[in-house]
Amino acid sequence: MTGGEPILIGRGVTKRFGGLVAVNGVDLEVNEREIFGLIGPNGAGKTTLFRLLSGVYAPSGGTITLRGRPIGGRSAHAINAMGIATTHQIVRPFVDMTVEKNVLVGVLYGRSGLRGSAADAEVDRILELTELAPHRNTLGRSLTLARRKRLEVARGLGTKPEVLLLDEVAAGLNPTESARIVELIRRIRDSGVSIVMVEHVMKAIMSLSDRIMVMDLGRKIALGTPSEIANDPAVIKAYLGERAVAS
Amino acid sequence: MTALWSRFSKRWLIIAQVLIILVAATATALIPIFDERSFNLQRITFFLLWYAILASSWNIIGGYAGQISFGHAAFLGMGAYVTGILWSQAKWSPLLTLPIAGLVAAAYGVIVGVPTLRLRGPYFAIATIGVGEATRLFFTNFDDIFGVTLTKGVTGISLGGGSMPTIDPVTVHYATIALFVVTMLTTLWIRGGRFGLGLFAINMDRDAAETAGVPTARLQVLALAVSAFFAGSAGALYAMRQQFLDPASMFGFDKSIALVLMPVVGGLGTVWGPVFGALLYFPVQDQLTRVVSDPYLPSLLYGVLLIVIVMFEPLGIAGLLGRSTKYARALVRPKDGEA
């Protein structure tokens, strides 16, 4: 599953806020068709790294490239045009538009270049994929949280990304809803999109990720498959403290 | 199946609206044919269409993109003065100046829009008040600044006399109808297409629009330029019709307020709301200025009206109609997705 070429590459990525080094010299490679998980205790720097990847922040040091092209210092829509789509942790649907129109915005302004009935067909495909088709005529403001989260993913998918960045997409969902979104993310990966996800819901990230990177205090402390990570002493120490490792 | 049906009915909805525009145009075009001496009727028609053009042009940036401009008279006056100067000084035929007036106003829209449309929240609206007043003062003092005699300051310019080319009022009548048709078809086309969808996305959440790939800065500036083009062209029509221009009546803050009032009264962001607003505003304004001697009383009434509308029916007349019948709702379509 993880056999693809690396497409999103970070080298020595650093972000400083005044005296605070939020992300400190992190190297990472995200492969084609890979689900790449990003975890760490609060304050580890994962949200900052995520914002560097989505182009919200420009790195203070190091480089981030997508297929060899640097992404730093571009506006959000230009990052999107390069092939990186982001979902917001706090969901932000276009509240007075139908679900269908929300996705159409992504399709018409994304990289697909589709117009007219071809764009409508693409919207239909994405609504089926994200199981939002029955709610296509519902206004964004009337959706439940679980459906808003899926709409957030659907709108991002509409832009035809190579890499989809998911910020806490399972947070706040009940176990059933969470399981459905896990299934959805797997289907998206299978359709050929690389996924980087930050997640607090451990069950979701452990069952989904091909590889997981663990951060603590701005540094990368571990990288590996979910089972490798679960047994890594450095990770256990970061999450639970020294004594948990000793015992 | 339902999706197919909704696309089918959407097409009919657009055809119906185009037909309404053409019927209105034909009806008003017949007026001078049936009665050449129908001067008062022609005057009323001119101002109804003129206000409808202005309100619809404002609606593109204010209603669709959600960027409220309190200085739109700047574009109206800019267009009027371009026509006034080319007509009186360069002796151009006034009709030929109309597209130039629109384009100059659109260019001014770009110049104003590039820095101000970056502003968020109420700051664009505040900036436009400054732009409107600065433009008025610029044209008032134009001659003094440049040491020429072009705008004649507060006294204004008289047009159509002396060696200037003349224009027949009936020609102005038809030019107004033509601009009305073009304006309405443009706003209808924007409302239903990719451009309009992007503007509504910006209106609802600019950051989310950016992450969905919408080039928000470029789209907003384009919307302001299109809006300014029609406002400036309407200014050219005013110059041809009234054959007199002065800064107070063209660039006045009361004009800018009228341009906000009409779409809000009629229905912000809808295609027909600004037209409803114009149909209501002109007769009221016309009668008020005759009956009421106090020049400030109308403004007070409009202020109260604005408050009442924003409190009870933010979508104005279009919102009220939208509640009444299925057919009215289909035509007015207050918000996307309310079938």
Image (cartoon, coloured by chain):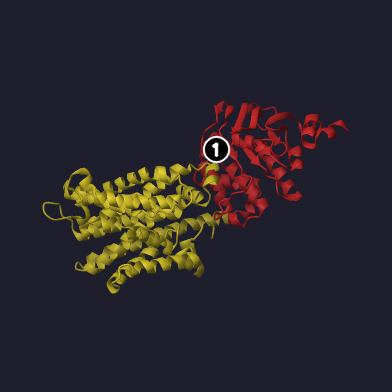
Tell me the quarter of the picture where residue A86 sits: top right
In the picture, measured across the screen, residue B150 lies left or right of residue A50, that is left
Extreme residue toward the left, this view? B162
Could you tell me the amino acid type at mark 1?
Asn
Chain that is coloured yellow in the picture: B
Of B308 and B65, which appears nearest the observer? B308
Identify the residue at image location x=49%, y=56%. B10
Q: Which residue is mark 1?
A: A80
Quadrant holding the N terminus of chain A: top right
Residue B91 in picture, x, y percent from top left? 16, 48
Q: How many marks?
A: 1
Helix, strand or loop under label 1: helix
Tell me the quarter of the picture where residue B338 sits: bottom right
Extreme residue toward the right, this view? A247
Residue A160 in picture, x, y percent from top left? 57, 39
Q: Please indicate, yes or no, whether residue B140 appears anywhere in the rendered image.
A: yes
Chain A shade:
red
Tell me the quarter of the picture where residue A88 sits: top right
Identify the residue at image location x=34%, y=63%. B24
Of B113 and B321, which appears nearest the observer? B113
Q: Please indicate, yes or no, whether residue A138 appears anywhere in the rendered image.
A: no
Q: Residues within 10 Å of mark 1 (few under 14, many from 20)?
A: many
Residue A15 in picture, x, y percent from top left? 60, 31
In the picture, measured across the screen, residue B339 lies left or right of residue B254, that is right
Residue A198 in picture, x, y percent from top left? 68, 39
Tag 1, which chain? A
